[in-house]
Image (cartoon, helix red, strand yellow):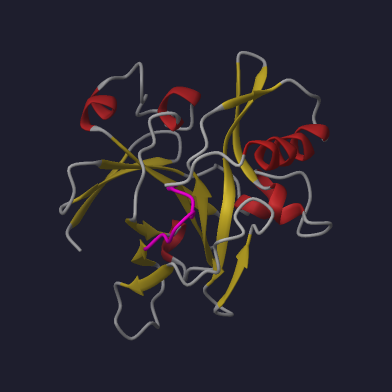
C-alpha cells in the first residue's frame, strides 16, 4: 500500500492513502491506554462493559457520544468480540485483515477491509492497539485543510471527529512499531450530547442505541 506519514504535535499523525481521495487522520493518547478497556469506558471487560464502549469527547462542559463499538479483533488469539446488543447482524466475518509483512511476524502495520451485509452498520472509526492505541478516521480534503474543522495540532476534537466519513477499508500502524494487539471498529452514529453524570452516561448511551436502532449502511 502506498502511504506517506506526517508527524504533527499532540501525539497525532496524518496519513495519506495513495488509493483514495480521502485523507486518513489519526490520534494517539499521550499515555499508554486500551481504547475499549480504559479510554472509552469506565471499567474493564466485565458486566457487558465492552458493549458500552463508545468514542466520546468533552466539549464545552458536555460529554458528546460519537460512535459505539461494533467489533474487536484480537490479533494474538484470532478471536472477535461483537457488540451483539446494538449490532446483532455482525458475526466478525465481514472483516478481513492483512499485514505489510507477508510472513505475519511483523504485525506493526497493515490494512483491513469490511464487507457489510444487509442491516450491518457503517464504519467511521477504527483503533489499532499495541502498548497504546491509535484512532483512525477519514476526512475530506476540505476538512483537512480547514483548521476550524480539523486542527492538525489536536485532531481529537468534536469538530474533526464529526467529519469522519464512511469507510469499507483502511490501514493501520500501531504506536512504537510494536506488534498489533487488537483492532477495534466503531459505528457511524451521529454525535449525541449525553447530559448525565460520569458513570451513568455509558449505560444511557447503550439504551439510546437500543431505542433508536437507526439506519444501517
To which quarter of the image does residue 151 belong?
top left
To which quarter of the image does residue 160 belong?
top left
Tally of numbered tags:
0
Q: Position of residue 60 (x, y in %)?
A: 61, 13
To which quarter of the image does residue 56 belong?
top right
> Is 200 situated left or right of 104 in this image?
right
> Is 112 situated left or right of 42 in this image?
left
Say if 76 sits above or below 111 in the image: below
Q: Which residue sits furthest front?
A: 118
Q: Is residue 121 magenta?
A: yes
State the residue at coordinates (66%, 59%): 84
Q: Position of residue 65 (x, y in %)?
A: 61, 32
Relative depth, front residue between 92 and 129 = 92
Say if 205 sits above or below 28 in the image: above
> Is 109 situated left or right of 57 in this image?
left
Say if 152 sits above or below 215 in the image: above
Q: Position of residue 137 (x, y in %)?
A: 39, 43
State the residue at coordinates (60%, 46%): 31
Say if 200 sits above or below 185 in the image: above
The stretch in magenta equals 115-123
Q: Quadrant of the N terminus?
A: bottom left
State the residue at coordinates (84%, 57%): 47
Amino acid at each position: 500500500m502506498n502511504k506517506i506519514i506526517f508527524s504533527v504535535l499532540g501525539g497525532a499523525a496524518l496519513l495519506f492513502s495513495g488509493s483514495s481521495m480521502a485523507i486518513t487522520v489519526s490520534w494517539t493518547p499521550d499515555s499508554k491506554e486500551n481504547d475499549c478497556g480504559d479510554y472509552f469506558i469506565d471499567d474493564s471487560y466485565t458486566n457487558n462493559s465492552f458493549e458500552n464502549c463508545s468514542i466520546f469527547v468533552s466539549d464545552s462542559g458536555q460529554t458528546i457520544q460519537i460512535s459505539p463499538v461494533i467489533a474487536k479483533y484480537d490479533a494474538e488469539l484470532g478471536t472477535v468480540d461483537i457488540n451483539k446488543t446494538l449490532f446483532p447482524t455482525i458475526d466478525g466475518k465481514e472483516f478481513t485483515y492483512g499485514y505489510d509483512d507477508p510472513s505475519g511476524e511483523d504485525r506493526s502495520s497493515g490494512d483491513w477491509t469490511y464487507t457489510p451485509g444487509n442491516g450491518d452498520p457503517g464504519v467511521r472509526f477504527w483503533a489499532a492497539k499495541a502498548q497504546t492505541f491509535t484512532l483512525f478516521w477519514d476526512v475530506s480534503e476540505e476538512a483537512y485543510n480547514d483548521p476550524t474543522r480539523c486542527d492538525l495540532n489536536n485532531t481529537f476534537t468534536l469538530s474533526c471527529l464529526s467529519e469522519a466519513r464512511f469507510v469499507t477499508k483502511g490501514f493501520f500502524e500501531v504506536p512504537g512499531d510494536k506488534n498489533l494487539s487488537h483492532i477495534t471498529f466503531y459505528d457511524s452514529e451521529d454525535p449525541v450530547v449525553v447530559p448525565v453524570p460520569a458513570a451513568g452516561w455509558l449505560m444511557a448511551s447503550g439504551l439510546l442505541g437500543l431505542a433508536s436502532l437507526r439506519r444501517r449502511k
